[in-house]
């Protein structure tokens, strides 16, 4: 049995909309009962060329639309003119182009009954069965998740896998590192996982960031290398000096990639053609780890060993700022919407804020020993973070007000976090072999 997922995103608008599709039949309905449904078949059966979605009300004509599909490609279409109230939704998938004479469905789903109301999200799961071969494909169809809801997607065996850093790629997928699995992973927003094995064994890929060249760049701390992978899975590797231990990486304002070298106490820069420049951190044995571009377009980094926050201009000038908690072990940083840099203090159990002039404010977490490693700006303008030891996702407003949300899987060790293209918070579950998504 093969598994795939598709997404319906539904909003009943209460006003007329234009019909969409290829060769669609227009159905006359009461304008007050019309709405719009967006069909996002993120992962289709590999032989799919056309999908037909039918929405039938309890009384009155059904609304039927056809959607052309491309193999292994996301496809997003809008379906307008939907009746509200109790409806039956069904789906058929064909292996020939829409409009082909005598076309016969190869994949079919049992009808699903739902109630469509203005402004009310609905969730549906289809089970598509291949009628010509007796197989079955499970299609999870998710309408917008309610606020405060989690989804988790299995991305590797929890035994021997270590999912670390996650970021949004240039293809609007989520990309992540599987360090002990020696893989770079890709997840669609529907949870379809693809993995690519790093060419060099025992590379221990850790940090990952989207580059200005449309590729993903990552660190190989086990082999002192910077890696590059295209969205189709083609790799290139660029060696550094032995003992560099590159850890985290970010796309800089100058089009290059900037990274921390915790082994040699340096900040590195690599162009998209592979030319490397290195800058020595002024404080010895500082242990640079986290790195981000600040609101001032400088490179900001955390000094894990001494609790400082550093700033580096793209021309190579350093400034270091002492935090109130020298033993706080700062790690992840992000440029906040308020013009400050926000950072996580793992051992200090605090979220920190530093102005571009160097004034630091710390906010202790409500949960003791939560161990927050990474931060991200959420779609709501708040700062979101993970709590490794507490198995929670946290939120702090720029005014310092906290909220916390328990992750469904126990002992998951949520680690890295980012805002996805679907306005959800996506995070790695380091110990559970899962990628999580949270709707704020």
Image (tube, helix red, strand yellow):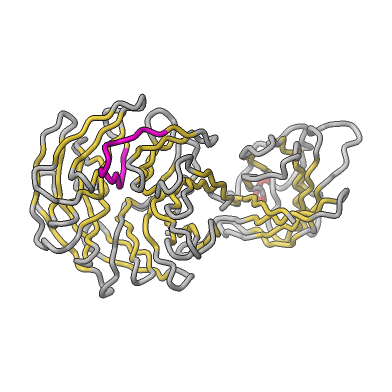
Q: Estimate the x, y position of residue 94 in percent, counting from the top left.
A: 80, 41
Which of the 4 image quadrants contains residue 357?
Answer: top left
Query: Can you say which quadrant of the picture contains the N terminus?
Result: bottom right
Front one among 39 and 408:
408
Q: Is residue 133 left or right of residue 334?
A: right
Q: Estimate the x, y position of residue 208 in percent, counting from the top left.
A: 38, 44
Front one among 180 and 429:
180
Query: Can you say which quadrant of the picture contains the C terminus?
Result: bottom left
Residue 305: in magenta span: no
Magenta-tinted stretch: 237-250
Residue 79 visible in image: yes
Front one among 313 and 178:
178
Residue located at (52% from left, 61% from top): 152
Q: Is residue 261 left or right of residue 321?
A: right
Q: Estimate the x, y position of residue 432 in percent, counting from the top left.
A: 48, 65
Q: Residue furthest bottom?
A: 368
């Amino acid at each position: 049995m093969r598994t795939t997922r598709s997404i319906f995103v539904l909003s009943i608008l209460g006003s007329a909309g234009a019909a969409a599709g290829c060769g669609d039949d227009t159905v006359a309905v009461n304008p007050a009962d019309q709405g719009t449904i967006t069909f996002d078949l993120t992962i289709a059966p590999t032989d799919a060329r056309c999908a037909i979605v039918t929405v039938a009300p309890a009384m009155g004509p059904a609304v039927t639309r056809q959607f052309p599909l491309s193999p292994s490609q996301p496809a997003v279409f809008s379906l307008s003119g939907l009746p509200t109230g109790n409806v039956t939704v069904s789906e058929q998938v064909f292996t020939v182009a829409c409009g082909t004479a005598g076309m016969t469905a190869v994949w079919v789903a049992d009808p699903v009954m739902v109630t469509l109301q203005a402004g009310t999200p609905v969730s549906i799961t289809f089970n598509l069965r291949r009628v010509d071969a007796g197989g079955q494909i499970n299609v999870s169809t998710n309408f917008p998740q309610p606020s405060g809801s989690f989804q988790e997607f299995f991305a590797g065996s929890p035994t021997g896998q270590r999912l670390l850093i996650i970021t949004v790629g240039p293809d609007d997928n989520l990309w992540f590192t599987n360090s002990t699995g020696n893989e770079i992973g890709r997840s669609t927003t529907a949870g379809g996982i693809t993995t690519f094995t790093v060419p060099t064994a025992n590379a221990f890929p850790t940090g990952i960031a989207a580059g200005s060249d449309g590729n993903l760049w990552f660190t190989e701390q086990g082999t002192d290398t910077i890696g590059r992978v295209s969205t189709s899975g083609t790799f290139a590797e660029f060696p550094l000096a032995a003992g560099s231990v590159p850890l985290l990486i970010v796309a800089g304002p100058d089009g290059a990639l900037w990274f921390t070298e915790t082994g040699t106490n340096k900040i590195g820069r690599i162009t998209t053609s592979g030319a490397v420049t290195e800058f020595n951190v002024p404080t010895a044995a500082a242990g640079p780890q986290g790195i981000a571009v600040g609101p001032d377009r400088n490179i900001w980094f955390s000094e894990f060993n001494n609790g400082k926050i550093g700033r580096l201009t793209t021309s190579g000038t350093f400034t270091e700022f002492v935090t109130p908690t020298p033993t706080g072990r700062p790690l992840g940083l992000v440029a906040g919407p308020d013009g400050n840099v926000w950072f996580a203090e793992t051992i200090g159990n605090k979220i920190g804020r530093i102005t571009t002039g160097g004034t630091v404010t710390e906010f202790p977490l409500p949960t003791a020993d939560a161990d927050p490693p990474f931060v991200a700006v959420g779609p709501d303008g708040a700062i979101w973070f993970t709590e490794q030891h507490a198995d929670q996702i946290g939120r702090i407003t720029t005014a310092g007000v906290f909220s916390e949300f328990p992750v469904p899987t126990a002992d998951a060790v949520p680690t890295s976090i980012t805002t996805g293209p679907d306005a959800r918070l996506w995070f790695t579950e380091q110990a559970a072999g899962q990628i999580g998504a949270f709707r704020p």
